[in-house]
Structures are given as structure tokens and as C-alpha cells.
Image: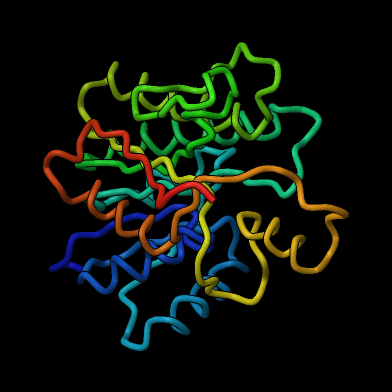
Amino acid sequence: MQNKSIVLVTGASGFIGGHCVLALLKKGYAVRATVRSESQIEKCKALINTHYPDRADVEYAIATLDSDRGWDAAVKGCEYILHLASPLPVQQPKNPNELIIPARDGALRVLAAAIRAGVKRVVMTSSQAAVCGSPSMEKDYIYDEKDWTDLNNKTVTAYNQSKTIAERAAWDFVNKENSLELATVCPGLVCGPVLEARVNASLEFVKRFMDGSLPLIPPLGYEVVDVRDVADLHLLAMEKPKGAGGRFMASAGFM
């Protein structure tokens, strides 16, 4: 890894994280992947090796969103960080803090460690849940990167709260410190090829439509985007000089 730029990928065993790792390897980067426990290292290693036939230049580090332990070691020597780790439940918890606290505090831990290590830029995965997660605008309103979910709206879900609060906290932190570049990526519903057999939370609703566990088809839709496009957007936000300070929407259209 000495002759390559090292990119830390948090949440590397996740749906988007796995595709980001593969995209980085294909472009010649060295990757350091964070996992939550020792047992996940072999799982993540098997996933990457299955889909990347060449020798994967990947190191592994253990760090969790709820603890400072391990983050300084994880970011040491890295030029960039793709911060994807964040709780994504299949069902909304009764207590929103179950999602808000790890999402917000985890992001701040990564950013603080990045500053200590002299990281050039962090690209953080947010969500359109932080952009248009409150149905407060008129029907034909077109959302863009200037919009934020209204947390005063009582219909905002715990997940939408967590993504909004975490991203706002990240921007506030970086703007105050002024020594680290930040970009965020805000995808809609992420679909596309899974890298392992289990169904992730993003695709759980598709599975429910297919297996009949939903008793009816509700009148709803989503901004949909391919996971490979989301991974490519992370790399563009990381590499391009104008990516710093950007908040990038990821959508291929409404379905």
C-alpha cells in the first residue's frame, strides 16, 4: 500500500460500501475497510475476494460508531475517507435516538479522527431522507441540494431524523474546524446487484412485494438509483477538486 493512496471505507461490508470498495480497487486505490468485530473481517474479505478476481489490496480495521476506540488507527495514513457506516433498520424503532445517536456521533468520531490524521477529504453517505424527508412542500416542488428535511414536522421518521441530524452535524463540525474537506452524497432508494445472498434493508421492500408479505400494493413511489452509480458518485466527490463542499443528489428518476 505504500505507493498508493489509501482510502478508508467505513461500513465496507454493507450494500453501498461493498460496491465502493470494488470501485476503488478497480481504479488502483488501496483500501482500508472498517468492520465492527473480528468475526466480520473474514466475512468482508470473502465478499470482496468473490467479486474482485485480482489480489485485493485491502487492509481491515475494527471500529464502531459508538466508541472512540480504533478510529485513530483506522484513519492513520489515509488520504481520503468514504464514511458509509450508519444504522439502516428494516423497521423504524420506537425511540428515534436508537438511530440518531450512532449516526451523528459516529460521523463526528470519523471527522475528528480524520482531522487528527491529516486526511484530505471525507465523503459521507447521507440520504434523500435528509433532503425531502418531510412532506411539507407542494406536490410539484423540485428538491435540490439546498433543501433540508424539516425536523419540526411531526411525520418525520426516526430514520429521516437520523440522516438529517447526522449530516447537519457533519457540516457544522467541518465548517467550524475549517481544516478538512467534506462532501456528502444523498441517494434515493438504492437498488442493483447484491454482493451476497442476504437481502439488505434497502431491498427488503422489493422482497416483500415479491413474496406477498405485503397484503396490498400501496400508492407510493421512490427516487431510485443504481448502487453502482452511487459508488461512482462517491469516487467523483472524492477525486474532483470541485467536489469539496458539495452536497450531491443521487437519483435516476421517480418510480
Query: 252 or 179, which is in the foreground?
Result: 252
Question: Is residue 184 shown to the viewer in this render?
Answer: yes
Q: Is residue 135 above or below residue 110?
A: above
Colour scheme shown: rainbow
* Residue 15 appears left or right of 20: right
Query: 51 or 40, which is in the foreground?
Result: 51
* Residue 89 appears left or right of 57: right
Q: Residue at horizontal 47%, vertical 60%?
A: 12
Q: Quadrant of the N terminus?
A: bottom left
Q: Residue at horizontal 83%, vertical 52%?
A: 216
Looking at the picture, how far across and down is residue 28, in whole percent? 20, 71
Q: Is residue 199 above or below residue 241?
A: below
Looking at the picture, how far across and down is residue 253, in whole percent? 43, 49
Q: Residue furthest top?
A: 152
Q: Is residue 242 above or below residue 205?
A: above
Q: Is residue 219 above or below residue 192?
A: above
Quarter of the rendering containing residue 196: bottom right
Question: Is residue 70 shown to the viewer in this render?
Answer: no
Looking at the picture, how far across and down is residue 163, in whole percent? 53, 33
Q: How many marks?
A: 0
Looking at the picture, how far across and down is residue 152, in whole percent? 61, 11
* Residue 7 appears left or right of 224: left
Query: 78 or 223, which is in the foreground?
Result: 223
Q: Residue at horizontal 46%, vertical 65%?
A: 18
Q: Residue at horizontal 22%, vertical 34%?
A: 181
Q: Residue furthest front?
A: 140
Q: Residue furthest bottom?
A: 53
